[in-house]
Amino acid sequence: MARAATTADVFNAVAEPRRREILDVLADGERPVNDLVRVLGLGQPQVSKHLRVLREVGAVEARDEGRQRLYRLNGRALKPIHDWVRRYERSWEERFESLDAVLEEIATEEEDHDRNDNRHGEGDAPR
């Protein structure tokens, strides 16, 4: 099966780790390209290429301010990802609750074991 174009939708666009890094940085607010280059440690052409893809799917918007172009996150474009992930949230919560119960049971067993050891003198100084 042919792979969908990177710019077909936001899912494909954010599949690339560097683009997710750009989104992470932009989550803190608007940034010019030079800031992104510095923060990410990438070359300006690479950052611009990734920004172009993110703009094409609407995940990033740009505005000109003087001689600079400022980029900002467009959270509305990421909503399909959020909606998709939410479908699995209940499953994760149930698993985490189960894990919490198991961990609590283990901790209780360890406390009981330590109390029994101390009552029988095993917690005393070496013999």
Image: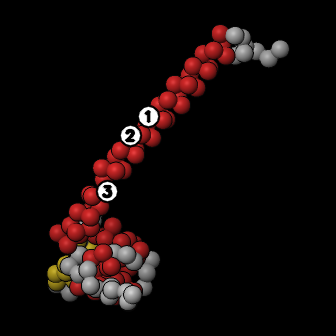
Q: Residue at x 36, y 50 (%)?
A: 92
Instruction: Say which element carries label 2.
Output: helix
Do the numbered discs 1 and 2 sit on residues whose CB atoms are within 8 Å? yes
Coordinates of residue 53 in the picture (x, y in percent): 29, 85
Q: Is residue 43 left or right of residue 79?
A: right
Q: Residue furthest right?
A: 127
In terms of image quadrants, where is residue 3?
bottom left
Which amino acid is tagged 3? Answer: Tyr
Using the image, determine if residue 121 lies above or below residue 79. Answer: above
Q: Which mark is residue 49?
A: none
Question: What residue sits right under mark 3 in the picture?
Answer: 88
Coordinates of residue 127 in the picture (x, y in percent): 83, 14
Which amino acid is tagged 1? Answer: Ala
Q: Is residue 93 left or right of residue 119?
A: left
- Residue 35 seen in the figure: no
In this orientation, which residue lies closer to the viewer: 95 or 76?
Answer: 95
Q: Residue at x 43, y 34 (%)?
A: 101
Gap between marks 1 and 2 measured at Cα: 6 Å
Which quadrant of the figure contains the N terminus?
Answer: bottom left
In this orientation, which residue lies closer to the viewer: 110 or 18?
Answer: 110
Q: Is residue 16 left or right of residue 67?
A: right
Gap between marks 3 and 2 measured at Cα: 14 Å
Q: Residue at x 34, y 50 (%)?
A: 91
Dot 1 surroundings within 10 Å: few (below 14), some, or many (20 or more)? few
Using the image, determine if residue 109 lies above or below residue 124. Answer: below
Instruction: Say which element carries label 1.
Output: helix
Question: What residue sits right under mark 2 in the picture?
Answer: 97
Lower sequence index among marks 3 and 2: 3
Using the image, determine if residue 16 lies above or below residue 76. Answer: below
